[in-house]
Amino acid sequence: MNKGYRNAILTAVILAVIGVVFVIGGILLGGVSQLKGADLLHRLGIARYDYVDKKITSSSTSTTAADAAYDADDIKNLEINLGESEVKIVKGTGNKILIEADNTVVESRVDGDRLKISNDDDEYLNNANIIITIPKGKHFSEVNIKLGAVESTIEELNCDELDLKLGAGELEISEGNIKDADMEVGAGELRYIGSINGDLDAKCGLGNMSFKLDGDEKDHNYNLKVGLGHMLVGNDSINGAGSRNVDNDTDSDFKIECGAGNVEVLF
């Protein structure tokens, strides 16, 4: 075998290995599982789902009515698990947390001081959308959000602790006021505008994360790691494999990891 053939075979093997790494990375970060209900896979024939048109109904044990309402003062923690539905969290003027849903089945219930909102991930619902209205300025202790392959928006979010997992969808948080945040993006896109005053643990797989934060770059310490992607933090950038630690002698620690995606943190 001449040298030209050997080089061609070696190149093909390397490209194949890189492809496998990308596929495995996407699966581990939840991209494929989140995409299972997406319209793209349905059209490609990779996953088959029957379109259904369902309206929510009432239940005595849990609320599934379109006009579900809860006293905001009684709710300290919020848990949202809405895999395949478009979600809009908007600011309200009253003192009620309201839940409205169209073309999907939503279950909401209160467990102590925690409001849990979820729907069925196993059934593909065409054009499903959910609107959650939260009183302006409402502050939560803990907020847990898990979203799938859809486009979602949050007008305002105030909490001490945020645990966010985004699969292959898009999420924009317009006014965030968070102390500590744990954010993970698979193959999706997260845009965050606001403040993170405590610690940030951010992981980006194949997708994109962008932060426009209040304050100054020197308000935080940084532990940065990049695989095959790109990261920009203030005026500091990392392209491809690399890592960086910056100690600004503060109480706020930002740990940010980027696989093969893009992360941008601006001030």
Image: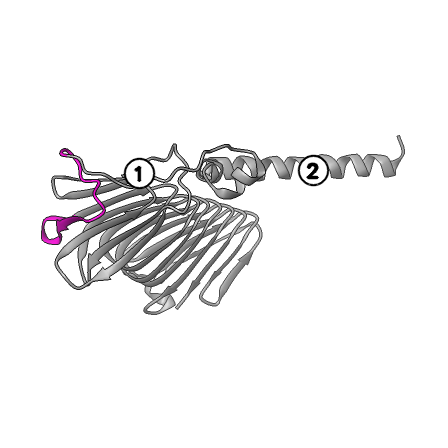
The amino acid type, in three-letter code, at marker 2 is: Ile
Looking at the rendered structure, which numbered label has been put on residue 96?
Answer: none
Residue at image x 18%, y 57%? Answer: 139
Give the vertical position of 259 relative to 215 (above or below): above
* Residue 215 belongs to the span the image colors magenta: no
Residue at image x 18%, y 44%? Answer: 115
In contact (CB < 8 Å): disc 2 and disc 1: no
- For marks 2 and 1, give the CA distance: 42 Å
Task: Please name the residue that numbered disc 1 is placed on.
Answer: 119
Residue 111 in picture, x, y percent from top left: 15, 38
**Image quadrant occupied by the C terminus:** bottom left
Classify residue 242 as left or right of residue 136: right
Label 2 vs label 1, nearer the camera: 1
Residue 119 in picture, x, y percent from top left: 31, 38
Which SS class for mark 1? strand
Frontmost residue, 66 versus 44: 66
**Image quadrant occupied by the N terminus:** top right
Say which quarter of the image contains residue 165: top left
Mark 2 neighbour class, 10 Å CA radius: few under 14, some 14 to 19, many 20 or more:
few
Which SS class for mark 2? helix
Task: Please name the residue that numbered disc 2 is placed on.
Answer: 14
Residues in magenta, as a range: 60-76
Mark 1 neighbour class, 10 Å CA radius: few under 14, some 14 to 19, many 20 or more:
some
* Residue 62 belongs to the span the image colors magenta: yes
Of label 2 and label 1, which has the lower sequence position? 2
Classify residue 41 as left or right of residue 103: right
